[in-house]
Image: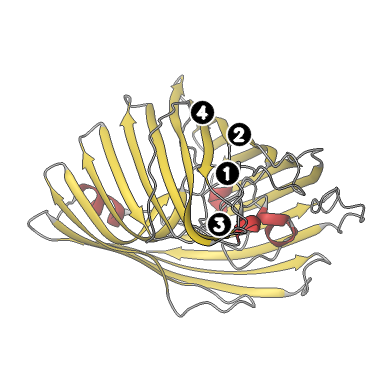
Amino acid sequence: MKKIVAGILIMLLMGTSLAMAENLVEPELKSMAPVETIKHMKPGLEYNGIIDAKIFSLANKNFGESSEWYFYPIYRMVLANVFSQKQFGLFVDIEKPGYANVTYPILKVNELYAKFQQDSLYVKIGRQVFGDKEDLLLGFQNDAISLGFDLGSIDLLFFLAKTQLLLPWTAATNGTMDGIIGFVPTFDLGSAMALKCYLMVGTEPVTVTTLTQVEDKTNALILVGGKYKMDMPVGATANLGLDAQLGVQFGTARDLNDQSIDAMALGTKIDGEYSMQNQDFGFTIGGHIVFTTGDPDPAVNTQTGFVSTNALVGAGPGLFSKIENGAGPYTFLDGHLASGKIRNYAGLFAFGVTADFDIGKFHPGAGLWLYSNTDDQGEALGPEFNEWVIFRISENVTLYQQAAIFMPSRDGIGWPPSPAPAPETAIKFLVGSSITF
């Protein structure tokens, strides 16, 4: 890893960790015993697995193979073994992904690390996942070393990761982060609240050229922020959740001509939900807002917009990029917009409303998202409608169906805004089944 440049700043804010509606349509393990085993260093061997198979169809003239049907199977195994001394454990999460016109390796290693623990001190070495898909500020999986102190209600986590995350000024330097250092303390504030803070510094080696010399330098992107979680009961059968995140992004960076890059940017994400469960019927209504500052004038490139470091499969405010669980950038939103705007929250305003229902073994739901560009003279990118139905045959067998429709109002790329007509409506349709054990 190249040089690591550090800075210190902590910010606080409100929020909660929501089980957002769109998560229900992705393969999930009903019991995560291995995760609990390795987290609490409980001696013994625990494992879970999943076999998930789906077929999906795409329709969008911007996608070269529209209206094709793809078969996408996933085989996944998660296990943990903590040895009797309670000081050493191994965690493995391996997946055999499907093939949807994309070549994947034989096995995809999501996590593979060893954990050492002595009293409150723990160390993890190997492939790890940091953050989650819904997090605006953190979410990636890389080879890393993490060290923490688990003090019960306080968890102090430090990590050093080798990563290839994109930077907001990628066009100016043609580079990605070569590494990231992070400090992410978590504070439990009782049974219903928790606070998480973020300080992350990512670096990028760059060679700048002036009239007199060529010089190697190290750019740095610094992200500070936090998330305050709240999940409170309302009466005997209802629950109210709120998750608000705020992050400030800035950098010490030069472009290839040794000109300073202004990387000051702001990002915020708010998710709220109200849920009620009564015997065999329940529902959850959620509202979601994402706002990140954009580039005032992309043609000048004197200032960059906010770009989330969340690169996990399925990250993004809506469902459109999640429907095939990482089968590739097959959509207008995934691949056509400059810099993957929707997927990386780059200069974006998004407003979404979701509704889930629990009717015995049936779990239908729907969502509506509206997207806008927050660059100078920002423009509406169009609405997206999502629909899903989940039928849980048993605790271990699930059938599901999902559809997503995106109706772009214009292409959303170029500066000034392109006069070209908007692409045609993009549609995905999916059916699948999963078996867990």
The percent coordinates of residue 206 (x first, y second) are 52, 60
In primary-sequence order, the first of circles 4 and 3 is: 3
The residue pinned by badge 4 equals 242
Decide: marks 1, 2 in contact (CB < 8 A)? yes
Q: Is residue 277 above or below residue 178?
A: above
Between the residue at mark 4 and the residue at mark 1, the CA separation in whole angstroms equals 14 Å
Disc 4 to disc 1: CB gap under 8 Å: no
The secondary structure type at the circle numbered 3 is loop
Residue at 58% from the left image edge and 59% from the top image edge: 212
Q: Label 1 vs label 2: CA separation?
A: 8 Å
The quadrant in which residue 231 appears is: top left
Q: Nearer the viewer, mark 4 or mark 3?
A: 3
User: Which circle marks residue 286 in the picture?
Assistant: 2
Could you tell me how far apart the alpha carbons at marks 3 and 2 are, in whole angstroms? 30 Å
Image quarter (top left, top right, bottom left or bottom right) of the C terminus = bottom left
What residue sits right under mark 1 in the picture? Answer: 21
* First-in-chain label (3 vs 2): 3
Q: Which is more N-terminal, label 3 or label 1?
A: 1
Question: Pointer 4: residues within 10 angstroms few (<14), some, or many (20+)?
Answer: many
- Do tag 4 and tag 3 residues touch (Cβ < 8 Å)? no
The residue tagged 3 is: 166
- Spatial distance from mark 1 to mark 3, Cα to Cα? 28 Å
Which callout, 1 or 2, points at the residue further toward the start of the chain? 1
Q: Secondary structure at mark 2?
A: strand
Residue sitting at the far top: 235
| Pair 3/2: label in front | 3
Give the alpha-carbon distance from disc 4 to disc 2, as whole Å.
Answer: 10 Å
